[in-house]
Amino acid sequence: MQLRYNYRAYPDGIQRRALASAFGCARVVWNDCLRDRKEAHAAGLPYVKSAALSRLRITQAKLTEERAWLADVSAVVLQQSLRDLDTAYKNFFDSVKGKRQGRKVGPPRYKSKKDTRQSIRLNTNAFSLQDNDTVYMAKVGNLKVKWSRRLPAAPTSLTVTKDSSGRYFLSFVVDAEPDTLPEVEAESGIDLGLSAFAVLSDGSKIDSPRFLRRAEKKLKRLQRELSRKAKGSKNRAKARIKVARQHAKVADRRRDWHHKAYTQIIRDNQAVFVEDLAVSGLGRTRLAKSVHDAGWSAFVGMLEYKAVRHGRTFTKVDRAFPSSQVCSACGFRDGPKPLHVREWTCGECGTVHDRDHNAARNVLFEGRRIVAAGRAETLNASWSVGKTRTRVPAQRVEAGSPQKGQTTQAGIPGPWAREHVK
């Protein structure tokens, strides 16, 4: 399987200017190639191949006066940008044809220097690890890196990102063997919520930390200060950085808490079953801020990745399953209930249920039934069964086309004692 290790980088002034040039050149190559393909499609011409685009928009463009500055950055950066565009188109075509599972993927869009996340990707020809604990990048130099832990193997690729708060991160992809944990007997169903972040089928509850709500007062003050600054002024740019840094702190705290929570769940349970929530739909309701603050989607993705790595069973229960309507004691379906009903009595057997605990138990039973029926559709129904499946890719999004309406996040550093592998 592939793992991704993220580290904080601290480039100096010259290196920051070199990275800014690399970000811009990669963006220009992406936009030029995307424009050529869009124009060819509008004119009814065949799909423009990558080889033709590479000659026209990279090799020949360097010889022109308008694009001569493309030669100031490593050619690997430009070639990888074109490859990322090919991957974006492949994902789009596979999604349209039904070959790609999950949500529909839209066509690639143009990149902007105002995007919250700037990134470039390099292969082993353009970077190397130095003996003095720095990372050499072609035409950038030796970058100072905060090594929170050692890489378990030689990296196969490197993604350099700059987030909206001006932080730089290096993301290494390495090939690693699964780290199978000793088997345990416990299994757990998980019901995700807002009052309690998660309720497990054994009755234990994980309280919601609500990081965004706790930081809301300071965020409001910083946002007010930003709104009072004149557009285009340096003071406004400084105020925007302050707001971005505060949001980054909230995201980092939430992500670190997620890592600790899902690691404990995976270590304590041989099988984990969770309901497949419609997070995108709930994110458009009056509960949107609380839903996004909880970060259910990211948490479930981390659970799935961790289960693959440690040989645990993981299954999603269909969102249409009536986990809150069925009595977990006798199986009687007692009908839908409004959200304010947190405790109810079964009309068939008279058992008094806590709404969330009952739902978690039902998720556990349904997950067991799915696994027994052999219909677990995740990548990791179990590691022994998963031997016939393809490799699990690293989970961190690399340089590509960011989707509209979705925020992007940079990688996070972390101490050796914690798991921050994506």
Image: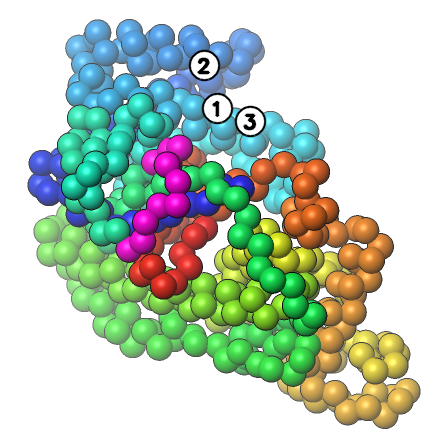
219 vs 92, left or right, is: left
Please determine whether, in this image, residue 238 is positioned above or below residue 40.
below
Identify the element where label 1 is drawn: helix
The residue pinned by badge 3 equals 90
Main SS class of the magenta portion in the image? loop
What amino acid is at disc 2? Ser
What amino acid is at disc 3? Lys
- The spot of residue 112 in percent (x, y) is 31, 36
Q: Residue at x 9, y 36 (%)?
A: 14
Q: Residue at x 88, y 81 (%)?
A: 330
Q: Quadrant of residue 91?
A: top right
- The spot of residue 268 in percent (x, y) is 59, 70
Mark 3 or mark 2, which is nearer the start of the sequence?
A: 2
Residue 53 on the magenta span: no
What amino acid is at disc 1? Asp
The answer to whether residue 53 is seen in the rendering is yes
Q: Quadrant of residue 281?
A: bottom right
The residue pinned by badge 1 equals 86
- The spot of residue 109 in percent (x, y) is 43, 32
Q: Quadrant of residue 269?
A: bottom right
The residue pinned by badge 2 equals 50
The answer to whether residue 284 is seen in the rendering is no
Please determine whether, in this image, residue 117 is positioned above or below residue 31.
below
Q: Residue at x 68, y 29 (%)?
A: 97
User: Are the residues tagged 1 and 2 within 8 Å (C-beta)?
Assistant: yes
Alpha carbons under labels 2 and 3: distance apart: 12 Å
Residue 153 on the magenta span: yes
Circle 3 crowding by C-alpha within 10 Å: few under 14, some 14–19, many from 20: some
Residue 162, numbered label: none
User: Are the residues tagged 3 and 1 within 8 Å (C-beta)?
Assistant: yes
Q: Nearer the viewer, residue 256 or 397?
A: 256
Identify the element where label 2 is drawn: helix
